[in-house]
Image (tube, helix red, strand yellow):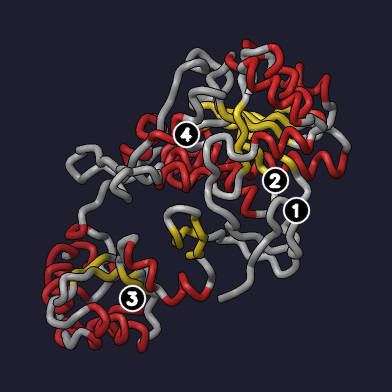
Amino acid sequence: MATNGASVNGHGEIRGPLTGIRILDLSIFQNGPFSTVMLSDMGADVIKIEHAEEGDPARNVRLVATTDSDAFKIYFETMNRNKRAITLNLKHAKGQGVFRKLVEKADVVVQNFRVGVAERLGIDYETLKKINPRIIRAANTGLGHLGPEATQPLLDGIGQARSGFVYVMADPDGTPSNIGNIGFADQSGAMILAYAITLALLARERYGVGQNVETSQLGAMMFLMQSGIHQVFIGNQQPRRIPRSESKNPLSNTYKCADGEWLSMAAVQSDRWFSPIVKMLDRDGLLEDPRFSSLDLRQEHQDELVRIFDEAFAERPREHWLGKLREIGMIMGPVQSFGDLLTDPQVIANDYVVELEHPTVGTLKEVGTPIYFSETPGRPRSTAPEFGQHTEEVLIEHGYDWKQIEELRAAGAI
């Protein structure tokens, strides 16, 4: 196993790219919290600030039951590993005072409230920069911070629908698909927010300025799908929803094998690969078939060629065909489930799955970082914190003594 590890809150021996950066994370659910997970994997000290009574609603999101008591939540774990958690009542004057003290030593404040909420709480950028002129305030909204619907709430499924993703992923008859519990739009927003924060940190290093950074789920989804979107904007052509049987290039398609498993081929150079593939499939007669003698004719008779390939691939198990495709140099791979990833040798070799020790559940397997650094590596380091687990620790770091902490607790500020 590679040792692609970063220090824990800057106290370990190995430094990550963001070791020494302190982030105050006020965000909830997914598209804010996962952005700070990405930064924490790279060594940043992320202090998760939760409402003193209600906490992050993500603590109550259940994807699947993992224990009899369901005390462990996969969703919250995924969105909050590596972080330190404190409780704070931002509606309380003393809670506001604590927050301002934290801002003095922070590099970044992250939130994903609806537009206008931060101003009402007194934690907007104009307020924060008076406390710390070098602060970076990063906000992730649903539909963007400007426009007639800027204040509207958004969750992942609506982000998928609003951005065009559901449309292009629909069944060939136009029936929208439900992508399910993978949080594609939320994760896209989180990645763009992490990217924006990193750029803002670089700008501050170069120019000495903090700044306000705004991203949105809608903007992130469009940014990631722009190749398809530009087919419409520039080419005036809507991407087609294509069933397998109508693939314009049957050599770039998915096929079901004898063991019920699927594989995917990507022979984009159809003329080059037609002969090697049909010989591999023991269908040499197709080379003399006039219906398949050119790319245009293969497209014209695509449904028939897909049917022939379906029959051929159904004769042997997937591993047989993957081996044969590998021998002829074809770009191909298995169609895998999430469970398959645990034993994928490429996943294992690159530390795309890591193990973390949870204090009550035991060893957890989680997705590692896909980024490799030769000198300043990063990786997941610790599981998500318990509610308010580090409140006293963080406050002591910021100059509070035990008497002051008890007074804050008695007042309902923490």
The residue carrying mark 1 is 10
Q: How crowded is mark 1: few (under 14 residues within 10 Å), some or many (20 or more)?
A: some
Mark 3 or mark 4, which is nearer to you?
Answer: 4
Which residue does the image show at 37% across and 79% down from the upper left? Answer: 330
Image quadrant holding the N terminus, namely: bottom right
Distance CA(mark 2)–CA(mark 1)? 7 Å
Q: Which quadrant would residue 385 be assigned to in this image?
A: top right
Residue 146 falls left or right of residue 395: left
Distance CA(mark 1)–CA(mark 3)? 55 Å
Residue 319 falls left or right of residue 99: left
Q: Which mark is residue 271?
A: 3
The residue carrying mark 4 is 29
Work out whether residue 189 or residue 4 is closer to the camera in this orientation and state it: 4
Label 3: element kind? helix
Q: What residue type is labelled 1?
A: Gly
Q: Is residue 290 visible?
A: no
Pointers 1 and 3 in contact (CB under 8 A)? Answer: no
Distance CA(mark 3)–CA(mark 2)? 54 Å
Which residue does the image show at 19% across and 80% down from the upper left? Answer: 317
Q: Looking at the image, is 250 positioned above or below residue 85?
A: below
Residue 56 location in percent, x, y? 49, 30
Q: Which of marks 2 and 1 is nearer the N terminus?
A: 1
Q: Which amino acid does label 3 sit on?
A: Asp
Q: What residue type is labelled 4?
A: Phe
Q: Earlier in the sequence, mark 4 or mark 2?
A: 4
Mark 1 or mark 4, which is nearer to you?
Answer: 1
Distance CA(mark 1)–CA(mark 4)? 26 Å
Q: Which of marks 1 and 3 is nearer the N terminus?
A: 1
Residue 75 location in percent, x, y? 42, 43
Which residue does the image show at 37% across and 36% down from the upper left? Answer: 61
Q: What residue type is labelled 2?
A: Asp
